[in-house]
Image: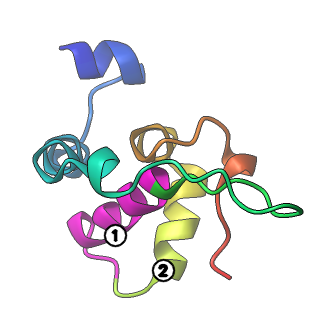
Amino acid sequence: PWLEARMGGPPSGHHKQLVSVPGMARIEALAPCWQGLPGRPPCERAALARAFVARAVFKFPTTSPLIETRSADKTLRRLCGWQRAGSNASGA
């Protein structure tokens, strides 16, 4: 119920699975926030790690479908840790 209220609608089976996996993996402990170097933006490692967990959960063969889906799926984007579509990391 809290996930539905937070995401604004019923989550799919993949979304539910994605919520449980990072909690078990303790991604924040394994990928701490890194402030970057001078001239380079800080990288949100935990969000990137959650995105690659999402890639496995959604069974995407490559990163490209993940990026496309993440840009269109507000729930997936929020579960990964990005608030806006424009704040997503690129596939580069």
Q: Earlier in the sequence, mark 1 or mark 2?
A: 1
Q: Residue at x 34, y 70 (%)?
A: 55
Residue under label 2, please give it.
Answer: 63
* Image quadrant where residue 59 sits: bottom left
**Callout 2: SS:** helix
* Image location (x, y in percent) of residue 17: 15, 48
Of 13 and 31, nearer the camera is 31
Which contiguous range is marked in magenta? 46-60
Amino acid carrying mark 2 in the image: Thr
* Image location (x, y in percent) of residue 51: 41, 60
Tag count in the figure?
2
The magenta stretch spans residue 49: yes
Amino acid carrying mark 1 in the image: Arg
Cβ atoms at labels 1 and 2 below 8 Å apart: yes
* Image location (x, y in percent) of residue 3: 26, 22
Residue under label 1, please give it.
Answer: 55
